[in-house]
């Protein structure tokens, strides 16, 4: 069915190179995806010797407990994410969701899966939440409960990508509100890109104040800082 839909939507051509493809990507472009490999910090998914907790997480522990990321945020992964997020290419959500769910540790339990919410203004402007479209696919594949209303975004913050890394934590401080008790729950938060982790950290803090016992990030792409 997925192959039929991709052929219908993309005319049997690869989304990236426009060459012949049976799915959304041809084998060559699929092989070019910058899949994350090697030793990564289990908490923030940045490089760390021996896959131990990195110095950043030891010095200033984030409120989330773990991060699973499928790709490095560079070409051609950034092209796919950008097309879903800003060009309404919703047919890419299952592809990105599939890449994501394959990198999630087999034993990772989640009582529910929730996407990072958009503000009402941003959702009205865009018409959809790209994180929610990815989360639908991941939740279905993992037979987990998808939650779209547990958390709300209180205010329409500036886009994180428009800000210096040093300003991003302040920008999202107090941005989320949890709508109900999550006493003892294990929560998986889905997003398209993780850069500084400030948004995910603030969301994890909100979820834990509501009683969540464990909060993990499931992200499609991870941006690496210059010194990583």
Image (cartoon, rainbow, N blue to C red):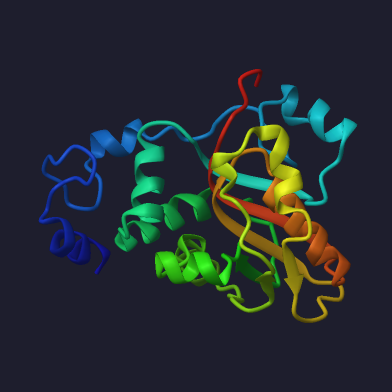
Q: Foreground: 18 or 40?
A: 18
Is residue 53 in view?
no
Image point (12%, 39%), residue name: 19
The x and y percentages for residue 228 are 65, 21
Image quadrant holding the N terminus, namely bottom left
Q: Foreground: 92 or 226?
A: 226
Left or right: 92 in relation to 216? left
Q: Is residue 98 above or below residue 209?
A: above
How many badges with numbers are in the image? 0
Is residue 226 in view?
yes
Image point (78%, 81%), residue name: 180
Residue 4 occupies which quadrant of the picture?
A: bottom left
Q: Is residue 207 above or below residue 225?
A: below
Image point (78%, 60%), residue name: 174
Left or right: 183 in relation to 72? right
The x and y percentages for residue 25 are 25, 45
Image point (84%, 64%), residue name: 208
Residue most toward the bottom? 180
Left or right: 171 in relation to 71? right
Left or right: 132 in relation to 11? right
The x and y percentages for residue 160 are 59, 45
Q: Foreground: 22 or 189?
A: 189
């Amino acid at each position: 069915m997925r192959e039929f839909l991709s052929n219908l939507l993309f005319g049997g051509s690869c989304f990236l190179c426009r060459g012949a493809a049976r799915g959304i990507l041809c084998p060559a472009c699929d092989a070019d995806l910058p899949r994350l490999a090697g030793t990564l910090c289990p908490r923030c998914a940045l490089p760390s010797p021996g896959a131990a907790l990195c110095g950043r997480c030891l010095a200033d522990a984030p409120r989330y407990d773990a991060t699973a990321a499928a790709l490095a945020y560079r070409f051609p992964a950034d092209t796919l994410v950008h097309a879903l997020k800003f060009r309404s290419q919703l047919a890419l959500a299952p592809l990105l969701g599939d890449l994501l769910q394959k990198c999630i540790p087999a034993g990772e339990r989640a009582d529910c899966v929730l996407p990072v919410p958009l503000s009402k203004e941003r959702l009205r402007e865009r018409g959809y939440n790209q994180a929610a479209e990815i989360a639908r696919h991941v939740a279905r594949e993992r037979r987990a409960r998808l939650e779209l209303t547990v958390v709300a975004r209180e205010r329409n913050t500036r886009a994180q990508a428009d800000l210096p890394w040093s300003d991003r934590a302040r920008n999202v401080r107090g941005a989320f509100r949890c709508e109900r008790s999550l006493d003892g729950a294990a929560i998986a938060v889905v997003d398209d890109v993780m850069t500084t982790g400030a948004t995910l950290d603030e969301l994890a803090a909100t979820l834990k104040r509501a009683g969540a016992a464990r909060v993990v990030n499931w992200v499609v792409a991870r941006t690496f800082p210059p010194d990583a």
